[in-house]
Image (cartoon, rainbow, N blue to C red):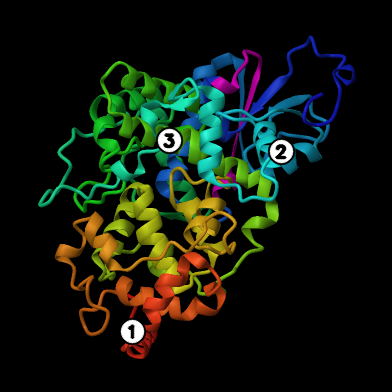
Amino acid sequence: MDTTGRSAAEHPDEAVPRRRWILTGQLGPAFDDGGPILLIESKSTFTKRPMHRAKAHLFLSAIRHRAAELGDRAEFHQVDRYEEVVEVGADLEVIDPPSWTARRFVRERGLRVLPSRGFVTSEPDFAAWASTRDGKRLLLEDFYRTVRERTGILMRGDQPEGGRWNYDHDNRNPPPKGAARLGLPEPLWPEEDDIDAEVREDLDRWQRDGLVQLVGDDGPRRFAATAAEAEAALADFIETRLGDFGPFEDAMLGGDWTMAHSLLSAPLNLGLLDPRDAVETVVAEHHAGRAPLSSVEGFTRQIIGWRDYVWHLYWHLGEPYRTSHNALAAHEPLPRQFRELDAAAIQSNCLRETIDGMRRHGWAHHIQRLMVLGNWALQHGYDPVALNDWFIDMFVDGTPWVMPANVIGMSQHADGGIVATKPYASGGAYIDKMSDYCGGCVFNPRVRLGEDACPFTAGYWAFLDRVEPRIRHNTRMAQPLAGMRRLSDLGAVIDQERTREQW
């Protein structure tokens, strides 16, 4: 039985290879079983909302490179809308698409739907695991351990490699004191070709004609657009940055936008890399004595833990999850500085550096996303749906499935605790500890009142006061709320933040 509910008997032409429609998130070898391929470049994908130019370039480059690789085996269409090619009852098969909208589209047209791919665990695997929880929360840590046990990755029999399930404690080092960079070699950047030049010309024309709204710089392409480029990027990460990835996984430096990160999230989400193969390649480095366990486990956790987890939560929580939660009553519109990635007028050094890095690259690493961008948005009460869409549109690795659990759930606590047990809010002290941002800033992370009061530090207490009625029963927030109530200058801090010019 396939996922459309039709039996093999209902497919009398099964011996005849069907054309397989490959979508943008399915561009790697794992989605190609050797038959005829349909590729569709739909301009409407890029016209719905403003999009970072680096993301639009990467997506167009990836699908056009795939068409070129497949040659005569591919039927490639460049159209305004998918409906121009995909008709109801079309003799097509498709691997289950990676969004609710796309899944509805293919089912409405009666296409043959194959089970999804591109993750370490299947949707039935997750459903079976979730059914055993007996009403308990679906915690990442429990899921991650189950995947490790099922796959044998980083396991010694029934015990975790090294005797510990995670090395988070070892992977929270601040950057080296006085360092402007980690001192690692530049990542291996892909070389642009004629396809990239054509993409650039098309985007220039579309923008000139008012067909698309592009945000951010037209820089050289920094992320893999082919499977070969993705494999080369993985090999380069292993050779030059894996050893430092774990210890400095959460660290930030204004002069080092890549730090020791792999830069593999975009090619993974395009389907160019098989996640299990990537993890097993990294794990083999530890077994060969060439990589520390803390770094290897941190990478493994990100891929077979968090990445699989948010994919499954996207389907498990349902399509309404993205728009039906606003537990902290956050309704403020996104400011122009976010929407236009305009860092020039931002005074807070950490936020300015992060927004400016996004403008240049369409990317920021996970701590910048959570503890700078997300923390700022949380404290200022930005509308979580608008913020979720912004993250999808402004990041090269942004997809409809990856952001809801990350933004609606973990970052903004809009779901009231379904994904994360407490709001991820903090004052400037955390940013000061984990970065060099505060040293050159006009604000002082230790000050909450006055001209040099840090917007994150003062904003933290103003945020707690604003949402206190909604979080007072959260046991994990009892200590911060008690601390807030002891502040003798709380009223003055709240008044200051109410009238402060944000930028």
Q: Name the kind of residue labelled 1 in the image.
A: Leu
Q: Which residue is mark 3?
A: 165
Towards the viewer: 30 or 102 = 30
Please tell me which of labels 2 and 1 falls first in the chain: 2
Does the image show residue 327?
yes
Element type at mark 3: loop
Instruction: Report the side of 387 relative to 326 (left or right).
Output: left
Does residue 368 show up magenta in the picture?
A: no
Up/down of 381 relative to 450, above or below: above
Q: Quadrant of the C terminus?
A: bottom left
Which numbered dot is residue 197?
none
Amino acid on which the number 3 mark rests in the picture: Trp
The magenta-colored residue range is: 30-46
Q: In the rendered structure, find residue 487 and report the number of the disc placed on it.
A: 1
Does residue 42 show up magenta in the picture? yes
The percent position of residue 464, horizontal first and vertical second, equals 44, 76
Outermost residue toward the top in this view: 15
Numbered disc total: 3
- Spatial CA distance of label 2 from label 3 is 50 Å
Indicate the amino acid at tag 2: Glu
Q: Which mark is residue 84?
A: 2
Q: Residue at x 26, y 43 (%)?
A: 248
CA gap between label 2 and label 1 equals 62 Å
Mark 2 neighbour density, 10 Å: few (under 14) some (14–19) many (20 or more)? few
Q: Earlier in the sequence, mark 2 or mark 3?
A: 2
Q: Earlier in the sequence, mark 1 or mark 3?
A: 3
Q: Quadrant of residue 77?
A: top right
**Image quarter of the N terminus:** top right
